[in-house]
């Protein structure tokens, strides 16, 4: 098998034109001849229309009662036909597109002329019979010439059309390559912006690690962890009092029972934040004991009703907390941890570090959002590049196949 010719894309048109000139030029010459013939036939229609106009004007000038009205009709008809024909544009270049467009437009014009003729010739009859016959002959010849051109355009000119399609395919391939270049250019710019963002993200993460590694920050972090552990422990230790606390809160809010304001606030605190409520108590948590004792009295008086199982557990825990000081150790731990957290939190160094950390974390969050947006756009561009590359490959294969069909030569188009 003969080795394929290698042709640069920018040279394909010139090479293909040289290879197909023996096919294309005779067809273009024939197309020009047929168009010239159509033009001549159209000119004949125009001449016969002018003759209708001349004869009509002569009859109008005579003022004959028999022909005057019909002459006026023919005068208007001839002018209309001349205006229609004057709008016909003869193509300068011969191509499948120009031939097709010319045939379509000319057919519309001749159809309109035919309709005008069919509408008004019976009105003119039986006068101007020679002019009308001459016009009908010219219109028939123009229609026949158009049909010959249309037949040539759709049949014999197909070979030349294939060459024109190949030229068009070259242009489309150039366009696709240009589109690919633009998309790849956008992707490179986006990748550059992404690298800059990634560098900033890494720098922010490094600064966050450095701040979090400071001894005060580490200690505060450890204290916060201890707070979370104690919160769970306090919640667990008061677990049997949660439902009674809620019922007691509802009771003290009603007119039938009253509680001192400071005790009411403390009760609310034990429901919303048990750790803080216990940690801010005086020694041996006196406020909690007062609340529990009054809650026990309300239970005894029947003002605070609980299910039997809840009631037993609640009374056991009330006794344990009030009379056995069961929360002394946990209370002391909560006070110490809260005090240490407050000391560290109000430290100037810690405050400065926390502010700086918050600012860097917010900046890092914004940078990561921007990177996610670039990643999303990058994925869209990557998909576009893949689709365009596949389109280019398909267009290249089709062009090479067309070249083979036209020239019987195997060619490889170099992009």
Image (cartoon, helix red, strand yellow):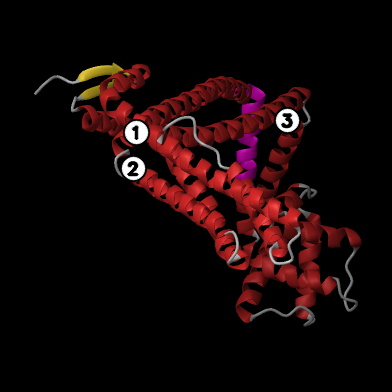
Query: Can see residue 390?
Result: no
The x, y position of residue 125, in whole percent, is: 59, 66
Q: How far apart are the two marked residues, 3 and 1, measured between alpha carbons? A: 98 Å
Q: Which residues are magenta?
A: 213-230
Against 93, residue 100 (above or below) is below
Secondary structure beneath dot 1 equals helix
Against 171, residue 153 (above or below) is below
Identify the residue position indicated by label 2 in the image.
Answer: 152
Query: Can see residue 217?
Result: yes
Q: Residues within 10 Å of mark 3 (few under 14, many from 20)?
A: some
Secondary structure beneath dot 3 equals helix
Q: How far apart are the two marked residues, 3 and 2, measured between alpha carbons? A: 96 Å
Residue lying at the far left of the rendered structure: 1
Check contact, mark 1 vs mark 2: CB within 8 A.
yes
Image quadrant where residue 305 sits:
bottom right
Q: Nearer the viewer, residue 77 or 315?
A: 77
Against 129, residue 251 (above or below) is below
Identify the residue position indicated by label 1 in the image.
Answer: 30
Identify the residue position indicated by label 3 in the image.
Answer: 344
Quarter occupied by the C terminus: top left
Q: Residues within 10 Å of mark 1 (few under 14, many from 20)?
A: some
Of labels 3 and 1, the one closer to you: 1
- Would you say 143 lies left or right of 304 here? left
Q: Nearer the viewer, residue 74 or 147?
A: 74
Check contact, mark 3 vs mark 2: CB within 8 A.
no
């Amino acid at each position: 098998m003969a080795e394929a010719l290698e042709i640069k894309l920018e040279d394909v048109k010139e090479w293909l034109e040289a290879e197909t000139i023996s096919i294309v030029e005779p067809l273009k010459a024939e197309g020009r001849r047929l168009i010239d013939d159509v033009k001549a036939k159209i000119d004949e229609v125009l001449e016969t229309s002018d003759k209708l106009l001349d004869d009509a004007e002569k009859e109008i000038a005579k003022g004959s009662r028999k022909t005057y009205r019909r002459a006026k009709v023919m005068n208007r008809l001839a002018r209309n036909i001349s205006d229609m024909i004057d709008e016909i544009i003869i193509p300068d270049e011969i191509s499948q597109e120009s031939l097709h467009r010319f045939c379509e437009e000319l057919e519309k014009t001749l159809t309109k002329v035919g309709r005008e003729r069919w509408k008004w010739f019976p009105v003119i009859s039986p006068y101007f019979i020679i002019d009308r016959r001459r016009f009908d002959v010219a219109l028939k010849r123009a229609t026949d010439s158009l049909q010959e051109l249309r037949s040539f355009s759709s049949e014999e000119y197909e070979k030349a059309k294939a060459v024109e399609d190949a030229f068009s395919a070259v242009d489309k391939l150039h366009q696709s390559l240009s589109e690919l270049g633009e998309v790849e250019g956008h992707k490179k710019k986006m990748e550059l912006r992404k690298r800059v963002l990634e560098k900033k993200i890494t720098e922010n993460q490094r600064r966050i690690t450095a701040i979090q590694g400071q001894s005060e920050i580490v200690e505060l972090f450890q204290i916060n962890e201890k707070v979370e552990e104690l919160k769970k422990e306090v919640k667990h230790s008061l677990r049997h009092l949660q439902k009674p606390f809620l019922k007691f809160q509802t009771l003290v809010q009603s007119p039938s029972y009253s509680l001192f304001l400071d005790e009411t606030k403390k009760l609310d605190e034990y429901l919303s934040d048990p750790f803080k409520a216990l940690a801010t108590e005086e020694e041996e948590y006196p406020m909690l004991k007062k609340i529990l004792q009054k809650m026990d009295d309300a239970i005894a008086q029947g003002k605070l009703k609980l299910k039997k199982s809840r009631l037993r557990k609640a009374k056991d825990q009330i006794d344990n907390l009030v009379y056995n000081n069961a929360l002394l150790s946990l209370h002391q731990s909560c006070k110490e941890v809260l005090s240490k957290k407050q000391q560290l939190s109000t430290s100037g160094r810690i405050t400065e570090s926390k502010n700086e950390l918050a600012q860097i974390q917010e900046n890092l969050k914004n940078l990561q959002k921007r990177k996610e947006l670039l990643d999303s756009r990058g994925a869209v561009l990557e998909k576009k590049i893949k689709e365009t590359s596949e389109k280019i490959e398909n267009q290249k294969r089709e062009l090479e196949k067309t070249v083979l069909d036209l020239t019987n030569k195997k060619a490889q188009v170099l992009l």
